Image (spheres, rainbow, N blue to C red):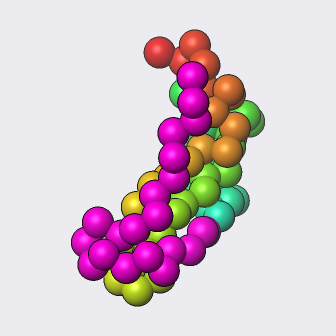
């Protein structure tokens, strides 16, 4: 299966000037009942209007079998 392509254009203002932001520390997300296994989140954002277009958990495998 091909990897999904990342956003290249802002859906709000149509700017192609996108940036990447890393969210760490208290912004990390955690699987329920496994607070010690948190993962940082990476955002793809528009550097013109500030919209966060996509967000990725950096270690999604930590969240398998949590439902
Ligand atoms: Zn924008």
Confirm whether residue 46 shows in the render.
yes
Between 60 and 32, the one lying in front of the other is: 60
Between 52 and 13, the one lying in front of the other is: 13
Q: Quadrant of residue 33?
A: top right
Magenta span dominant secondary structure: loop
Instruction: Relative to 42, say whether 2 is above or below.
Output: above
Residue furthest left as drawn: 12
Residue furthest front as drawn: 2
Q: Position of residue 21 (x, y in %)?
A: 60, 69
Between 25 and 5, the one lying in front of the other is: 5
Q: Viewed as shown, does residue 6 lie left or right of 60?
A: left
Per the rendered image, the range of residues in magenta is 1-21
The residue at the point 63 percent across, 33 percent down is 60
Q: How many marks?
A: 0
The residue at the point 51 percent across, 46 percent down is 5
The residue at the point 69 percent across, 38 percent down is 59
Confirm whether residue 31 shows in the render.
no
Instruction: Relative to 29, say whether 19 is above or below.
Output: below
The residue at the point 40 percent across, 86 percent down is 48
Quadrant where the N terminus is found in the figure: top right
Q: Position of residue 28 (x, y in %)?
A: 62, 51
Q: Position of residue 14 (x, y in %)?
A: 30, 75
């Amino acid at each position: 299966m091909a990897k999904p392509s990342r956003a290249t254009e802002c859906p709000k203002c149509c700017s192609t000037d996108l940036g990447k932001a890393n969210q760490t520390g208290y912004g990390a997300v955690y699987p329920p009942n496994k607070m010690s296994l948190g993962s940082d989140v990476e955002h793809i954002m528009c550097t013109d209007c500030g919209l966060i277009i996509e967000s990725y958990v950096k270690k999604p495998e930590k969240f398998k079998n949590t439902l």
